[in-house]
């Protein structure tokens, strides 16, 4: 039984929980084999393909569209719609038991780390593919790929970073947020690094281009070293410092293990990452196989992000959507829209997810699903409101039959215990009695339905 | 150890930290010390370019360093022959003309930080640039002056999330973007029963969730009751920010026990093609503020209201190659209200000939503005809240 609790923990942290079918299968697994299996599945990633707006157009066609205001407007509208589709498709992959949950979980982590707003569909798609390709690969190559990512280049104004007139935005965030963290570089280092990234730009069609005539080939002095550095040299210098391995390990620890860091465990991770020259697969395997990962202090103590919360809910209730825009709608209401982080530092996370209004929305969401209630939420602006017309229903169909079948032959007390074990990670035995007495229906099917809905409305369900 | 610190620490140790507000036994200190004053904080997020907000149009250096984005004299609103408003601020010119606005130039802090997040944290926590605090200046005011208050809504943020500025150790502000929606969301019998269920000896995050649930249920009833009968009569612009200020106005005019409001407007990070972008944002700001002020005046509330507008930093004096500006330092800050003792432009405009690393030097520490508001407007002792003593100013 103890191992089952560990596996549940692993499934929630390395993925998005489990369906009832997965839950039943879990009881036969062992931790080490499961970790290997999760990692191997995640490595079988596929390049995502999706319709985009301008990738297949010729330059002449693009130029013609840019001159025509109404066509341009139409193109932008279509692109926004396609970004929304990339978003909801992603959530549904997270929730799909037949896809690698770890791949999506790692991608979500890195999307928050290399936080970037992607406004057009081809840029969003390219970036997501870069993240999927590198999420368990080598962090050094990963940073270099992100520095060449057109969406990031535009988001952090590296398009405007040119010789003689550097724009420091990317160089600063590269160090402050993406690699080494504050305290290990100077303002002068920011200025010199910006020079090294001059000319790293992107084409109209959204591919990386090195513009030689905009690049500053001069000598730079960066972190005490002097040379004719380019962007890759800068990244190498930063990553050759152990502080970077510690910074990245801390971020991974806080996300996957616990917001309160235990220094010895962190140092263990940083040593491994640094010794393995930033091999992320090695690091994550080590974390998931460590005894300390399964310590009591880590289990069921993390507040789910809106995406984790929704993907988990969809996975366990086998929800299908008539209209997927309902997902996007909840993302906005709960404060986490994919491809649209609040700023380059990503979503703050932890208790910050929860304030009075977001908590009530979460606790009511299941209720909404059941009753198909119409919910209204203030949308960004008039244009978006228009495109949401008719989508106001969070229109999901919950498939409970497999859950009902699982517990149908049990008595009310056993049903309560069983469902709590399936949905919750923490020991909440003090809730069993009040829950039992709050459900008044007689037949087992109704008891299971009502009990499911009530357990999901408990604040404890917000934790993983 | 001071008694107050001791009490806070023992509350943390015993877990009573997350006791719901209505269980707190001692009666509010606030009732007796309430100053009767309102404070509205408006945050312009992203680093508003102060030099193109209040423009030093007599200064040749300004045009020299901003050959493209420098605003020409005929494109701005002259205030005193030296400084002028960005055209986007047209709507609040009347407030300025009537002596209900004060402008403080060169507001900042020593060793300025050019990161959005860090500088915003410094402003929101009221810390020094080498000091890291996890509570906000308004949150600590609530801890100090509103500890054990019966009300959860003494400080309200009109947003989906609560800013660090509003978070204290024991007390925090309350975030609501729409009171009617909140009321609807709390109308659930089962959740009312859940709130009463036992949840002892669990992780602090569980305790936090229950406390939030209980406080929300209480406050939603209260706010909804207050706001449903008071619809604003002024016409607010149909923008997100306009709607936020409309909610503020409706709550204030319906005599809620909220005294502090926090509202933000974002998008000021103008690294490229700044001119149109900034003007549009300032216009959104000014038109909404104008409607709010007119509503408050109609309800005789403006004399007891102070509106402070700030941004986490100003921007680099020199324009960049993309017709925008990079992160800078000292900035301009606005105060508005019917009870201002000093009006107009309170100090000298920026000195463009004395830059440090291409950035303006601050002459007024933002914490001395906080100190003034805390002491003279909210009637408390600023050094308890800010942790240090600051020289107060005399605008109120």
Image (cartoon, coloured by chain):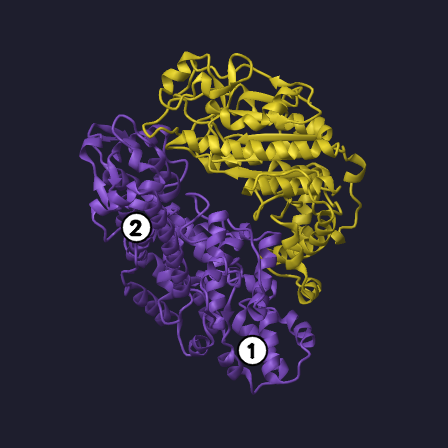
Chain colours: A purple, B yellow
* First in residue order: circle 2 vs circle 1: 2
Circle 2: element type: helix
Q: Could you tell me residue B284's position as x and y percent?
A: 53, 35
- Left or right: A4 with respect to B373? left
Compared with A415, A31 (above or below) is above
Is residue B127 in view?
Answer: no
In the foreground, B273 or B359: B273
Name the quadrant containing residue B191. Answer: bottom right
Compared with B203, A118 (above or below) is above
Numbered mark located on residue B72 in the image: none
Q: Residue at x 19, y 31 (%)?
A: A213
Q: Could you tell me residue B116's position as x and y percent?
A: 46, 36
Q: Residue at x 40, y 51 (%)?
A: A339
Compared with A48, B381 (above or below) is above
Parent chain of label 2: A
Residue at the disc numbered 1: A418
In the foreground, B74 or A323: B74
């Amino acid at each position: 039984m103890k191992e089952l609790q560990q596996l549940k923990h692993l499934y929630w942290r390395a993925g998005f929980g489990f369906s009832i079918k997965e839950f039943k299968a879990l009881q036969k697994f062992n931790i080490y084999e499961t970790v290997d299996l999760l990692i191997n599945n995640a490595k079988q990633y596929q390049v995502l393909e999706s319709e985009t707006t301008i990738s297949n157009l010729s330059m002449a066609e693009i130029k013609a569209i840019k001159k025509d205001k109404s066509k341009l407007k139409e193109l932008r509208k279509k692109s926004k719609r396609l970004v929304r589709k990339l978003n909801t498709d992603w959530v549904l992959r997270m929730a799909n038991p037949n896809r690698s949950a770890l791949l999506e979980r790692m991608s979500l982590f890195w999307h928050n780390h290399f936080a970037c707003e992607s406004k057009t569909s081809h840029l969003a798609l390219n970036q997501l593919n870069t993240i999927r390709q590198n999420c368990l690969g080598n962090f050094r190559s990963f940073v270099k790929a992100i520095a060449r990512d057109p969406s990031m280049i535009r988001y952090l104004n590296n398009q405007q970073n040119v010789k003689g007139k550097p724009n420091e935005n990317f160089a600063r965030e590269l160090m402050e947020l993406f690699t080494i963290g504050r305290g290990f570089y100077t303002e002068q280092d920011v200025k010199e690094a910006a020079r090294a990234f001059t000319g790293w730009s992107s084409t109209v069609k959204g591919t990386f281009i090195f513009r030689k005539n905009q690049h500053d080939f001069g000598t730079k002095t960066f972190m005490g070293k002097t040379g004719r550095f380019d962007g890759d040299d800068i990244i190498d210098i930063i990553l050759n410092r152990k502080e970077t391995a510690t910074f990245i390990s801390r971020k991974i620890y806080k996300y996957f293990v616990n917001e309160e860091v235990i220094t010895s465990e962190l140092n263990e991770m940083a040593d491994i990452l640094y010794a393995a020259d930033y091999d992320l697969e090695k690091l994550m395997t080590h974390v998931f196989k460590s005894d300390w990962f399964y310590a009591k202090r880590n289990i069921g103590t993390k507040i789910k992000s809106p995406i984790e919360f929704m993907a988990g809910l969809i996975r366990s209730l086998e929800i299908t959507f008539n209209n997927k825009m309902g997902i996007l709608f909840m993302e906005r209401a709960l404060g986490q829209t994919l491809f649209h982080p609040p700023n380059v530092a990503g979503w703050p996370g932890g208790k910050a997810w929860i304030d009075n209004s977001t908590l009530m929305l979460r606790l009511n969401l299941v209720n909404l699903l059941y009753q198909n209630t119409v919910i209204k939420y203030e949308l960004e602006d008039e244009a978006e409101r228009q495109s949401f017309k008719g989508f106001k229903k969070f229109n999901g169909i919950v498939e409970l039959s497999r859950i009902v079948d699982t517990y149908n032959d049990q008595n009310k007390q056993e049903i309560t215990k069983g469902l709590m074990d399936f949905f919750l990670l923490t020991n909440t035995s003090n809730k069993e009695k009040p829950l039992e007495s709050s459900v008044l229906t007689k037949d087992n099917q109704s008891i299971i339905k009502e009990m499911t809905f009530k357990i999901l409305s408990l604040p404890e369900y917000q934790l993983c | 150890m001071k008694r107050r610190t001791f009490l806070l620490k023992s509350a943390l140790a015993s877990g009573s930290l997350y006791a719901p507000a209505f269980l707190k036994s001692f009666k509010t200190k606030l009732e007796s010390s309430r100053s009767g004053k309102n404070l509205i904080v408006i945050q312009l997020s992203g680093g508003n370019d102060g030099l193109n907000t209040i423009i030093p149009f007599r200064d040749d250096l300004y045009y020299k360093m901003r050959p493209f984005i420098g605003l020409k004299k005929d494109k701005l609103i002259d205030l005193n022959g030296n400084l002028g408003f960005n055209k986007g601020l047209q709507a609040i010119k009347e407030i300025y003309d009537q002596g209900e606005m004060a402008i403080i130039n060169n507001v900042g802090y020593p060793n300025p930080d050019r990161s959005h997040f860090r500088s915003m944290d410094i402003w929101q926590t009221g810390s020094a640039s080498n000091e890291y605090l996890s509570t906000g200046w308004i949150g600590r005011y609530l801890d100090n002056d509103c500890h054990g208050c019966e009300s959860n809504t003494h400080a309200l943020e009109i947003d989906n999330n609560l800013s660090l500025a509003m978070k204290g150790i024991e007390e925090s502000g309350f975030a609501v973007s729409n009171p009617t929606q909140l009321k609807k969301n709390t109308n659930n019998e089962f959740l009312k029963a859940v709130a009463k269920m036992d949840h002892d000896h669990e992780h602090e995050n569980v305790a936090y969730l229950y406390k939030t649930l209980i406080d929300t249920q209480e406050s939603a009833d209260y706010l909804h009751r207050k706001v449903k009968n008071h619809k604003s009569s002024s016409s607010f612009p149909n923008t997100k920010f306009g709607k936020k200020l409309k909610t503020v106005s409706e709550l204030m005019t319906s005599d809620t026990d909220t005294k502090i409001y926090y509202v933000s407007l974002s998008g000021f990070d103008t690294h490229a093609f700044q001119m149109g972008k900034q003007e549009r944002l300032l216009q959104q700001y000014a038109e909404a503020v104008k409607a709010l002020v007119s509503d408050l005046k109609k309800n005789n509330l403006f004399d007891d209201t102070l509106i402070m507008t700030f941004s986490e930093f100003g921007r680099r004096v020199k324009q960049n190659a993309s017709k925008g500006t990079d992160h800078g330092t000292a900035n301009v800050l606005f105060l508005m209200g019917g009870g201002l003792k000093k009006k107009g432009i309170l100090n000298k405009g920026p000195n463009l000939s004395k830059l440090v690393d291409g950035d303006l030097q601050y002459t007024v520490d933002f914490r001395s503005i906080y100190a003034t508001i805390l002491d003279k407007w909210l009637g408390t002792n600023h050094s308890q809240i800010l942790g240090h003593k600051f020289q107060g100013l005399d605008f109120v």
